[in-house]
Image (cartoon, grey):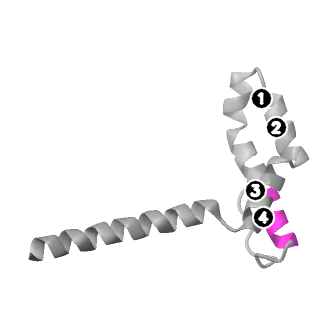
């Protein structure tokens, strides 16, 4: 009986964590819109286009692409008032 209760608690914990992680991944509609806006950002598109058909450029530009997407996403979220302005700027890839 005690073992069943322990397994039940573990199962409940695992399901709760999985549900939380899924909720975080989906985000709010505003966050999803900012994710789409980040993918449509001209800087992001330019980096993607530069890498088309060039695996070497794709490997070199991974960090630049990640940083450009994050910058565009953060700008969108700030523009919508979902995150505060300011803060510490992260280091840019070389």
For the point 82% across and 44% down, the residue is: 44
For the point 18% across and 75% down, the residue is: 5
Q: Is 32 or 44 nearer to us in this picture?
A: 32
Which residue matches tag 2? Answer: 47
Instruction: Residue lying at the far top in this picture: please name it.
Output: 53
Instruction: Residue lying at the far left in this picture: please name it.
Output: 1
* Magenta residue span: 70-79
Q: Work out how far the residue at label 3 is from the one at label 1, CA to CA, in angstroms.
A: 21 Å
Which residue matches tag 1? Answer: 51
Disc 3 or disc 1, which is closer to the eye? 3
Q: Work out how far the residue at label 4 is from the one at label 2, CA to CA, in angstroms.
A: 18 Å
Q: Work out how far the residue at label 2 is from the one at label 1, CA to CA, in angstroms.
A: 7 Å
Q: Are marks 4 and 3 in contact (CB under 8 Å)?
A: no
Which residue matches tag 3? Answer: 35
For the point 77% across and 67% down, the residue is: 30
The quadrant of the picture occupied by the C terminus is top right
Instruction: Residue lying at the far right in this picture: please name it.
Output: 42
Q: Is 26 or 40 nearer to us in this picture?
A: 26
> Which callout, 4 or 3, points at the residue further toward the start of the chain?
3
- Asked if 24 appears above or below 63 in the picture, the reply is below
Magenta-drawn stretch contains 38 = no
The quadrant of the picture occupied by the N terminus is bottom left
Magenta-drawn stretch contains 71 = yes
Q: Is 75 or 21 nearer to us in this picture?
A: 21
Secondary structure under the numbered disc 3 in the rendered image = helix
Question: Neighbour class for label 2 at 10 Å: few (<14), some, many (≥20)?
Answer: some
> Which numbered dot is residue 74?
4
Q: Work out how far the residue at label 3 is from the one at label 2, CA to CA, in angstroms.
A: 17 Å
Residue 6 in view (yes/no): yes
Question: Neighbour class for label 1 at 10 Å: few (<14), some, many (≥20)?
Answer: some
């Amino acid at each position: 009986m005690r073992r069943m209760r322990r397994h039940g608690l573990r199962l409940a914990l695992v399901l709760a964590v999985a549900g939380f992680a899924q909720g975080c991944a989906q985000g709010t509609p505003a966050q999803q819109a900012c994710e789409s806006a980040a993918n449509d950002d001209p800087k992001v598109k330019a980096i993607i286009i530069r890498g088309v058909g060039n695996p070497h450029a794709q490997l070199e530009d991974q960090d630049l692409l990640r940083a450009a997407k994050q910058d565009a996403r953060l700008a969108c979220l700030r523009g919508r008032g979902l995150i505060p302005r300011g803060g510490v700027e992260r280091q840019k890839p070389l």
